[in-house]
Amino acid sequence: MCLGIPGQITELVDLDLLVAKVDIGGVKRDVIITCVVDDEHPAEECVGAWVLVHAGFAMSRLDEDEAARTLAYLAAIGDMDAELEAIRNIADALERSA
Amino acid sequence: MKYIDEFRDPATAKKLVEEINRLTSGMFPSTSLRERSSPLAERSRSQPLQVMEFCGGHTHTLFKYGIEGMLPADIEMVHGPGCPVCVLPMSRVDDCVTIAEQPGVIFTTFGDAMRVPGTRKSLLQAKADGCDVRMVYSPMDALTIARKNPERDVVFFALGFETTMPSTALTLLQAHREGLQNFSLFCNHITTPATMRAILTDPDLKLDGFLAPGHVSMVIGVHPYDFVTRDYHKPLVITGFEPLDILHALWMLMKQLAEGRCEVENQYARIVPEAGNVAGLKAIAEVYETREHSEFRGLGNIGDAGVQIRSAYAAYDAEKRFNLQAAASSHDPEHLKCAEVLRGVIKPWDCPAFGKDCNPQHPLGALMVSPEGSCAAYYAYGKLAKRKETA
Ligand code: SF4
């Protein structure tokens, strides 16, 4: 819950609500980017940025090396598959219940 | 990708361990420290330095990489309560089950909380008994469920330290913006500095310093810890989750102790800005206010440690919506020693249930539920831990 997982912003979904698509280890999901947007980092320019995602919210920006390192670390401690699995399954379940 | 290995590079780790060793052996027994009336002056070789890693994520790293086994015997790691699932009292789980049992309710939660035992049952058992309990990855998923099920009452179980607080606060604000009538939060967030203060005033614990959580600090910044050095004269280093982060932070902490300094230092500056996350803190302040008392498993009631939803957003407060009475505090059954383990007074294997009727498949206590709980960590990596014990 507290570790978070790095992902890369691939597109802006909603500029008003600050929702972006983030690719997290190959799984795409909508993420709220309110906490990583400010005057220096406008939402319009966020595509391509690496962010640390906690519970569906981007909480910090990362450089690419840090993101790669964190992904490798999560894979090493074995937290990654379970987390990705959860993200994927829950996205599917929400989709199905539509 | 060359940086990836740098953080687990055995040569760097070895060097850091050597430096830590050098620093601690210089401290014991040190006349120069005594002369400087350092807090360490009273220590002797028989009393190792006690360093608490507050965060369950750090506990996990310590075990996974056998870091304790690398450290000199002069350093004892005390595992802190920084795993939100582990400090969840049974009475809160009971409240969750009570809400989930109401007709028409969809109860949503992070997966970690599903298996925490209550006095009656866990949420997983409630689900098996027919309640609509759903695991979500994000509080925003709960909002999606609420939009799709306007005739149902959707509740999200908001728990965790400051790391998850911006996400629930922003979700509530979004529900408010949309005017959603069927969404509420059952707020059980707790805050790190107040919990640390409770630990610092516990007479059973004599800590020499703290490793502070990286991702909580990413949200709250550096200064909320100032009281630890100012009022309690304990050095504190904010650190990341990589094994080398932790070794580096321990080295920084030992350096402070050896030099008689007492400061808040930030080893994890690459993620933790001094002022924290401004947008996140703004959302937290907008939605939450300090709660007078919060019950923690093992630590009892801690004043000002939890938050509740401000009255301006009462419509989204599950406590009000379901008219929850302040539940009587709950105690773990006598033979379960979760409270003592949580406070670092005993080790998990001193609990009679450890590894017998309490194991990760059938957790009796919350410390066995999450991989960040110290009982689960001792269970999974037990060999490493015991080697140190007998060394
Ligand atoms: S072994 Fe189980 S019952 Fe005993 S302290 Fe750990 S979690 Fe609690």
Image (cartoon, grey):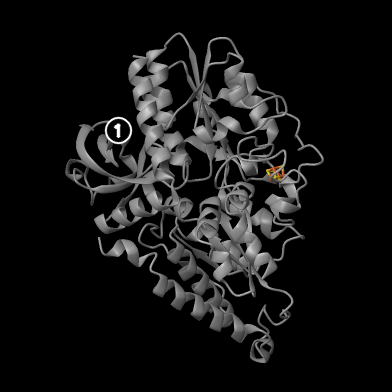
Vertically, is B276 above or below B188?
Answer: below
- Residue B319 visible somewhere in the drawing: no
Q: Is residue A15 left or right of residue A71?
A: left
Per the image, the residue denoted by label 1 is: A29
Occupied quadrant, residue B144: top left
- Residue B366 visible somewhere in the drawing: yes
- Along the line of sight, which residue is nearer the eye, B65 or B99? B65
Give x and y (percent) for residue B46: 74, 77
- Name the chain under label 1: A
Give x and y (percent) for residue B27: 62, 84
Give x and y (percent) for residue B103: 58, 9
Image point (60%, 13%), residue name: B102
| Circle count | 1
Q: Residue furthest right?
A: B334
Location of the C terminus of chain B by quadrant is bottom right
Considering the numbered disc 1 on the image, is that residue within a helix, a strand or a loop? strand
Q: Is residue B239 left or right of residue B333?
A: left
Image point (60%, 86%), residue name: B26
Image point (70%, 56%), residue name: B344
> Dot 1: few (<14), some (14–19), or many (≥20) neighbours within 10 Å?
some
Amino acid beneath label 1? Arg
